[in-house]
Image (cartoon, grey):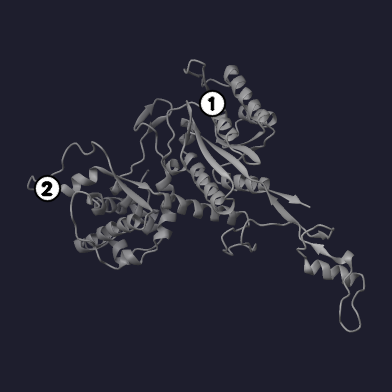
Amino acid sequence: MPFRTRSETGDAVARNLRAVVSDPCPIAAMRLTSYTRYTGGVADALNLEGLLDHLSDFLLQGGFAGGPHHHPFWGTFDDADRSPEALKEALLRALIESGQLTAEMLAELRGEGSGDEEVRQRIAEMLDRLVERLVEEGYLRMDEIPGGGQVEPTDEEGRVDEARSAARNVEFGLTGKGLDFLGYRTLKGLLGAMGKSSFGSHDTPFLDTGVEAEAASRPYHFGDTLNLDIPATLKSALARGALGDDGTIALDYSDLHVHQAEYRSSCATVLMLDTSHSMILYGEDRFTPAKKVALALTHLIRTQFPGDTLRVVTFGDRAEEIPLSRLGEAKVGPFHTNTAEGFSLARRILLSQKQDMRQIVMITDGKPSALTLEDGRVYKNSAGLDRRVLQETFREAAACRKAGILINTFMLARDPYLVGFVNKVSEIARGKAYFTSTMTLGQFIMKDFLTRKTRRAG
């Protein structure tokens, strides 16, 4: 992840920040060395969940599959840095951006301080303690890298530095709790932006304890559940002149109004995520926002619609299903776009589900450019819209329609030649096409999902 700081901190912050985080994190050495825990109160008093919010993009970035990769047209892409040092650097940036450092610490980082080594040590110890807290509270895990750190680092006297050696063999990862937390925060932000909240917060004019129901009441019919809409019932009686001289209201059968219920059908969803190289090209990371939406959708289904299912399929040169626990580590790669195989795999998954409704939610930014041949080889063609690839993709879309599976496509590009392709898929599969951006992707998906989840029941 490129290093960035606020403009007012200047280059001095960048230099001093790297100097502060250069020491190995004690967590990294947990399995191999013993250490004395930092017991200061500053790190323990900081809002850990607020810091995780600031770190969400950093924690979910996927990098480029296969490590460093260069292409004369695409440029050079590196795998995401999952080292403890990168984590501490990101934590320090989050502390600076959220204004949680003392004035003395900020001055030292800007290079305006007196070069006090004690202040630098306090910052380093605070970062170590924050990493410890993230691990202790179950948001992150530290994993050993097999065969990592081949050259043993030594100290000034030539002795092997066991702590630094251990740090080179360790990388961090999100736990299930960490993924769930980021999904919750993302979903809360998305629903808040839509004017709704499913979590009891009142950041918008809508007050809600679940998915908002806006069904109007209607006159009562025999056999209805007597879920009276009292204001509407009284209004009808008063309009009829049923108010007596003694202040009583004589209700008639025709005055009764009941709330309409919403029937929530069970739904099986496969979220198809494009992992082709274009998802992180052109100066924009489109893949990380897509993963955040997937986590939010997972949290919504788990907490509000427990009868539903959500599976994730990634498609590049080939399509594969990934467990939700691995979603945070999913990566793009030097891949083409095998949309046809993605549809085929998603269809097989959905046909094994017994929900009332089955749907595919596809997030992509490019044209189909690959297909899997009968012998298992992958045919690729990046030049324009290849007729052979298109025909196979449309055939798979038609197979989804025949199986009663809806395909909704969320396109992160608006190239004219892509519009026709997406509209054709939507026409074949009786779905919808949404041309959106990374900023509005989540709102579009949530609105579509919640709209299709409910329908009126008389």
Mark 1 or mark 2: name the one nearer the start of the chain.
Answer: 2
Q: CA distance from mark 1 to mark 2?
A: 53 Å
Residue 233 appears at what percent x and percent y? 83, 67
Residue 320 appears at what percent x and percent y? 48, 31
Residue 277 appears at what percent x and percent y? 46, 31
Q: Quadrant of residue 120?
A: bottom left
Can residue 344 be seen here? The reply is yes
Residue 236 appears at what percent x and percent y? 87, 67
Element at label 2: loop
Circle 2 Cα neighbour tier, 10 Å, few/some/many (<14 / 14–19 / ≥20): few
Q: Amino acid at mark 2?
A: Asp
- The residue sitting at the top extreme is 375
| 342 shown above or below 50 | above
Location of mark 2 (residue): 155
The quadrant of the rendering that contains the N terminus is top left
Whether residue 196 sits left or right of residue 372 in the image: it is: right
| 87 shown above or below 323 | below
Whether residue 31 sits left or right of residue 142 in the image: it is: left
| 458 shown above or below 348 | below
Q: Quadrant of residue 63?
A: top left
Circle 1 Cα neighbour tier, 10 Å, few/some/many (<14 / 14–19 / ≥20): many
Q: Residue at x 19, y 47 (%)?
A: 164
Location of mark 1 (residue): 341
Residue 372 versus residue 423: which sits nearer the camera? Answer: 372
- Marks 2 and 1: in contact by CB < 8 Å? no
- The residue sitting at the left extreme is 157
Q: Amino acid at mark 1?
A: Glu
